[in-house]
Image (spheres, rainbow, N blue to C red):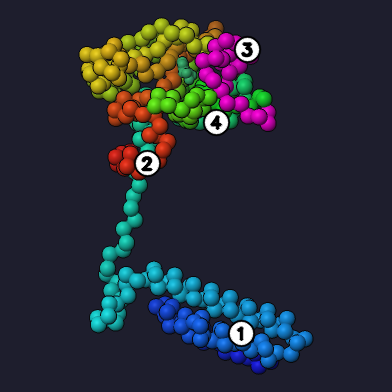
């Protein structure tokens, strides 16, 4: 045992003297088929039976020690390969060689467009607000004038969380608007970007998750004219000065009056094509004046304050902007698709 201990001690000292670049020499002397680790393991047969357990442990530890050192040397030499001198050259490594380039990724088209939308509204004084994707029934539905069993709940087919029937995956980012209104700080002027979920069959035009930016402005004397002007500004910034808009009356439980906004088709300039289904217009968002019930539900005096809200799907705007025909491309992570969006915005 004594001898074995001494020998291992000597070996460890020698192992410590190896330098980067020595990995292969190290392997041959220590770990090869005729290497010293194998040889010293063979010493087991000379150890007295009552000491075999202890010696076995000792030798195993040593073996692991040598193997670990080899891994370290290998890693170091792999890293420093580019600065190792070439055979026949001056023996000093060339430290002036350029480093290995780190390839830069590109932003996802959804992030690009979302950031662009957010920045336009920020310039108008809107602040970004975010909230949970797993939400309770109150913040996603009830507070928004969608009480239990209200038929309008059918408009948004929902994923519920089986552990708790009160929990669901939010179907829009309006839940964030409710949370902000409940804080009671007025005026409220926010945009809420985020991911939302609906129980839809996946196809080229629908997915079970997508992204929205919703907006909310509540103060005294906010009118539908403010809503129109805000959205008009947004469209001109986003799509260019020549794009036209129109509002169509619509229904949302949380706004009254409600409207949907169309823009003149970017593909055919309003002439009529397959994207706009020959109408010359494409719908891009829903909007309206916040329903007094919603204000009351969130503790805001609906006699004193009014507000507008709007919500748009980022996928839809991205598809229009880049003429993408299939929604599934956004979540398939196909590099050939993603590499086409190289802007760093
Ligand atoms: N929350 C609505 C939706 O997801 C969009 C919307 C927001 C409509 C605000 C009107 C006002 O469909």
Name the quadrant containing residue 239: top left
Which label belongs to residue 149? 3
Task: Name the residue tied to disc 2.
Answer: 334
Question: Mark 4 or 1, which is nearer the eye?
Answer: 1
Task: Name the residue tied to disc 1.
Answer: 41
Q: Earlier in the sequence, mark 4 or mark 2?
A: 4
Question: Residue 232: percent from the left, percent from the top?
Answer: 32, 16
Residue at x 48%, y 25% (from the top left corner): 201
Which label belongs to residue 133? 4
Q: Earlier in the sequence, mark 4 or mark 3?
A: 4
Q: Distance between the residues labelled 4 and 2?
A: 25 Å
Q: Which residue lies furthest to the bottom in this view?
A: 3
Question: Residue 148: percent from the left, percent from the top?
Answer: 63, 14
Quarter the C terminus occupies: top left
Name the quadrant containing residue 142: top right
Which label belongs to residue 207? none
Nearer the observer, 218 or 38: 38
Magenta highlight: main SS: loop
Q: Residues within 10 Å of mark 1 (few under 14, many from 20)?
A: some
Q: Which of marks 4 and 1 is nearer the N terminus?
A: 1
Q: Earlier in the sequence, mark 1 or mark 3?
A: 1
Q: How far apart are marks 4 and 1 (CA)?
A: 59 Å
Residue range in magenta is: 140-164
Q: Earlier in the sequence, mark 2 or mark 3?
A: 3
Quarter the N terminus occupies: bottom right
């Amino acid at each position: 045992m004594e001898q074995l201990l001494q020998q291992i001690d000597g070996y460890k000292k020698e192992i410590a003297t190896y330098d980067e670049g020595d990995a292969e020499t190290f392997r041959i002397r220590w770990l090869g088929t005729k290497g010293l680790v194998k040889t010293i393991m063979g010493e087991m047969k000379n150890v007295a039976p009552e000491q075999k357990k202890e010696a076995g442990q000792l030798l195993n530890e040593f073996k692991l020690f040598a193997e670990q050192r080899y891994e370290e040397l290998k890693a170091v030499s792999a890293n420093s390969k580019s600065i190792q001198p070439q055979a026949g050259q001056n023996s000093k490594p060339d430290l002036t060689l350029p480093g290995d380039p780190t390839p830069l990724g590109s932003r996802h088209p959804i992030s690009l467009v979302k950031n662009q939308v957010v920045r336009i509204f920020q310039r108008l004084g809107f602040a970004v607000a975010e909230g949970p994707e797993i939400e309770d029934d109150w913040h996603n539905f009830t507070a928004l004038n969608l009480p239990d069993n209200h038929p309008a709940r059918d408009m948004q087919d929902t994923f519920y969380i089986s552990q708790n029937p009160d929990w669901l995956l939010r179907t829009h980012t309006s839940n964030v608007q409710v949370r902000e209104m409940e804080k009671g700080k007025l005026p409220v002027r926010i945009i809420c970007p985020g991911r939302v979920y609906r129980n839809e069959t996946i196809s080229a035009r629908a997915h079970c998750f997508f992204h929205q930016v919703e907006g909310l402005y509540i103060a005294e004397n906010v009118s539908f004219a403010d809503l129109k002007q805000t959205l008009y500004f947004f469209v001109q910034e986003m799509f260019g000065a020549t794009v036209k808009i129109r509002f169509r009356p619509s229904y949302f439980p949380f706004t009254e009056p409600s409207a949907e906004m169309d823009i003149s088709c970017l593909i055919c300039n309003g002439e009529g094509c397959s994207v706009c289904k020959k109408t010359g217009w494409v719908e891009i968002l829903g909007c309206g004046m916040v329903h007094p019930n919603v204000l009351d539900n969130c503790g805001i005096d609906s006699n004193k304050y009014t507000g507008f809200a709007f919500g748009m799907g980022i996928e839809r705007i991205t598809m229009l902007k880049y003429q993408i025909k299939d929604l599934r491309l956004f979540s398939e992570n196909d590099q050939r698709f993603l590499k086409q969006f190289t802007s760093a915005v």
